[in-house]
Image: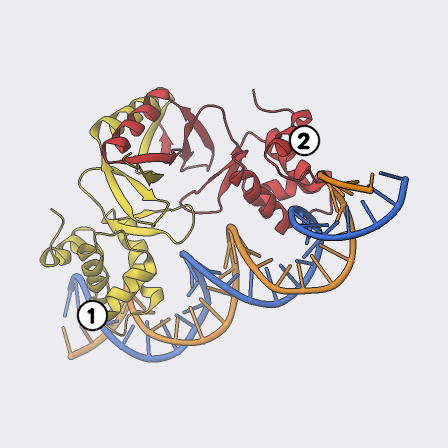
Chain colours: A red, B yellow, C blue, D orange
DNA sequence: AGTGCAGTTGCGAACTATTTGCAATTTAGG
DNA sequence: CCTAAATTGCAAATAGTTCGCAACTGCACT
């Protein structure tokens, strides 16, 4: 499972980041969201809790969290970046081209294979999540 | 190998796209570039050949080519999208976080594994190129 | 509990990447 | 060649994200 709101404060402290009510709000919004929200979505959700948070602060909080490894940012081909709490296990993302839904594809195998291939070229992988565009298979 | 300028015209015709000098210029620029140029790079290169092409046209041409499957667009985490001619073999991209270089990682194995995993979830993959952020390994 | 100061916030304006409206031009086909 | 429909260049518009700055706040140290 993913961190509970109670743990939020210590996550920030452990990362040496100041605990502010805005950051708590943003993290809480992210923790409760399992649909890979965009910055705008996070902003909307955070605003329900604290109507005074600004868009800029949401962006700054997200950037801070990503830098601290607490959250992750996914660049999607078109449209805004989307965010999620950093998962314990690396996974890829499937974006359904028909409805924009994002689902996760976890596979040790995939991660291991990529690491091996990158290493063969003399590189270490810093982030290995990737986004695949997919469509639901029809069951005929 | 990738298409030669001579083939450009027929690539467009085959796709049912009108052949214009601007599109020829844009494709030629893409064909000759093996560094995954951004739209701006393509614009700069196209402009050397035909000083009158506009930025808007480059974007429109790239969009048209991508839609026709002649070119591909890569969303990179930060910075502009980058383009390349559609390769015969699918491959992933490694972006060197230190210098921004992009290299290619081809692997049948990787592609096959992803297809299998996506199929298990009931999806077919439409595009499976992905972008990994990497750093050169130090040889100690 | 009080104080200082670096870190953080909200606001709007700035910026970057990309798209669009429109009149003029060009293409493909008969 | 002639015409309809597609394409272009330009400049202005948009989407997403970042930034400058004055006001505010968390945290370390009394």
Q: Secondary structure at mark 1?
A: helix
Q: Is residue D25 left or right of residue B62?
A: right
Residue, x 23% and y 26% (percent of image)? B109
Q: Place residue B140 in its image quadrant.
A: top left
- What residue is shown at x 65% (from left), y 29% (from top)? A10
Q: Quadrant of residue B121?
A: top left
User: From what the image shows, is residue B65 above or below residue C29?
Assistant: above
Which chain's residue wears label 2? A
Residue A9: image tag: 2
Gap in angstroms between the C-alphas marked 1 and 2: 58 Å
Side (left or right) of A69 relative to B88: right
Disc assigned to residue B49: 1
Nearer the camera: disc 1 or disc 2: 2
Q: Residues within 10 Å of mark 2 (few under 14, many from 20)?
A: some
Q: How many marks?
A: 2
Question: Does the rendering let one see residue B18?
Answer: no
At 24% from the left edge and 37% from the top edge, which residue is drawn? B105
x 42%, y 35%: residue: A95
Q: Neighbour class for label 1 at 10 Å: few (<14), some, many (≥20)? A: some
Q: Where's residue A20, x and y in %?
A: 70, 40
Query: Which residue is more in the foreground, B15 or B87?
Result: B87
Q: Nearer the viewer, residue A32 or B134?
A: B134
Up-down relation of residue D29 to residue D22 (above or below): above
* Residue C26: percent from left, percent from top: 22, 72
What x and y, as percent, mark residue B39? 33, 58
- In this view, A29 is above or below D24: above
In depth, the one of A75 and B72 nearer the eye is A75
Note whether D14 is above or below A85 in the view shown.
below
Percent x, y of residue C15: 50, 64
Q: Is residue C27 left or right of residue A100?
A: left
């Amino acid at each position: 499972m993913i961190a509970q709101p109670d743990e939020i404060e210590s996550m920030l402290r452990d990362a040496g980041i100041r605990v502010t009510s805005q950051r708590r709000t943003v993290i809480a919004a992210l923790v409760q969201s399992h649909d890979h929200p965009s910055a705008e979505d996070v902003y909307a959700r955070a605003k329900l809790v604290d109507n005074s948070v600004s868009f800029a602060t949401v962006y700054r909080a997200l950037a801070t969290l990503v830098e601290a490894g607490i959250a992750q940012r996914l660049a999607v081909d078109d449209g805004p970046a989307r965010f999620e709490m950093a998962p314990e296990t690396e996974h890829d993302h499937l974006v359904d081209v028909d409805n924009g839904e994002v689902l996760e594809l976890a596979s040790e195998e995939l991660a291991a294979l990529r690491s091996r291939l990158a290493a063969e070229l003399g590189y270490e992988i810093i982030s290995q999540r990737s986004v695949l565009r997919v469509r639901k298979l029809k069951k005929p």
